[in-house]
Image: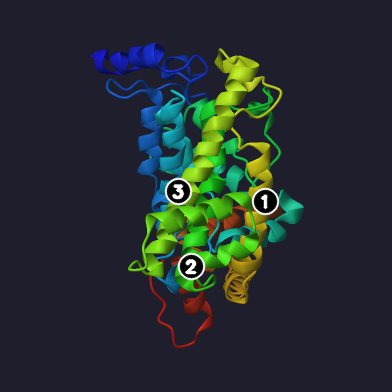
Amino acid sequence: MNKFRETIEKREIEFLADYATKSVESKGRTLHGNEIDPYRTCFQRDRDRILYSTAFKRLQYKTQVYLTHEGDFYRTRLTHTLEVVQHAKTFARVFNGNEDLCEAIALAHDIGHAPFGHAGEKTLNEIMKDYGGFEHNFQSLRVVDKLEKRYPKYDGLNLCYETREGLARHTSRYDNPKVPSEFSQYPFPSIETQFVNISDPLAYCAHDLEDALSAGFIKNYRDLKSVDLLFINEILEKVKKQTSPRHDDFIKNRIFVRNLIEFLSIDVIKQTFKNIEKYRIKSVDEMRNLEVKCVDMSNEIKEQYKILFKYLENEVYFNPRVLRMNEKGKMIIESLFKKFEENPKILPKRTKKKWENVKTEKERKTVICDFMSGMTDKFAMDIYQQLFEPYERVMRI
């Protein structure tokens, strides 16, 4: 009966790199016990559980940079997540890593994000500062461990240790949380987690730039010449060679972004190969116990990338329009949180029952925080309208 799964597991042992995480060597489902599937490996099952979760579906209406109602063509948390998946699986394929584990981690890496992007996360963190704070990576872990309700015997999704580790140890420019003791026995996580970690900034740097071009924050790709970076100038030259005067800026903008993704990805691949050869990494434990991060950009490009990101901050993330959107999101979250605290009877029945079943102020705030962080932008705005606009109809929630 289990022949199909066993065939995949044997194929992993045969074809994956020595430092790659094999399904058959997983530490398993440490929360509620293992659940063997006849056709899928443990990481494939994790991927599917995440894909069908409520929290994953909500990503389609959660902000990446621009509020979801500002336009249909801007990235959302969902489209960002899918791009991270694509990058991570590409790296896994190049280095013979476990694509299924990469996909599971990447699909779940943002499911704990609050509405209204990082502005929403900062607002909830400020509200919860005396009660443990709020950090979206740990909230992602909390979602898959406790908050998802899909099975009769336990709460959460009962994911494998390695998938959960990928969420707890997700790091980027925005994310550098203290690692929980459960996942801190090694200096670094699996190579698959590292693939996802590097894929996140690659994805948002490229797509935030493309969205900024679409939104008019950056007039056209030629404006990037002002950044005066060697690799940007190289990419501008490539665009010139790959296009002609008959091509308008719409297509040239996209060719620029495509070349940017390719350039950064190739740099990561070259540097990671150098690291693997330099440190002679031959096993999963050697990868985890390495002195430095294995999956990385070269030092030269890393420094140039920081300058590019600073440009994006000035032109996009700190653009007055984006800051006004952020203030709107902050105001909505603060107002709703305060209103729910003042009158918890207006919470949805399931959330209200949770609130009534806890006793301490921290637990009650956490119940409201869990509810609010699970909201989509649209849902939060709808509830705000219902509560604060006198002539708005009160719909079911």
Mark 1 lies on residue: 306
Give left or right: position of 8 versus 353.
left
- Quarter of the picture holding the N terminus: top left
Mark 2 closeness class: few <14, some 14–19, many ≥20 residues within 10 Å: many
User: Reading the chain from its start, which is encountered first: label 1 or label 3?
Assistant: 3
Tag in front: 2 or 3: 2
- What residue do we see at 64% from left, 17% from top? 279
Give left or right: position of 141 versus 134.
left
User: Against 93, is 246 above or below?
Assistant: below
Secondary structure under the numbered disc 1 in the rendered image:
helix
How was the colour assigned to the protein in this rendering?
A: rainbow
Distance between the alpha carbons at the discs numbered 1 and 2: 20 Å
Mark 2 lies on residue: 213
Give left or right: position of 46 versus 188.
left
Mark 3 closeness class: few <14, some 14–19, many ≥20 residues within 10 Å: many
Q: Position of residue 314 (x, y in %)?
A: 66, 66
Q: Nearer the viewer, residue 286 or 117?
A: 286
Q: Nearer the viewer, residue 366 or 40?
A: 40
Residue type, mark 1 in image: Lys
User: Against 317, is 166 above or below?
Assistant: above
Secondary structure under the numbered disc 3 in the rendered image:
helix
Q: Position of residue 297 (x, y in %)?
A: 61, 37
Q: Which mark is residue 81?
A: 3
Q: Residue furthest right?
A: 130
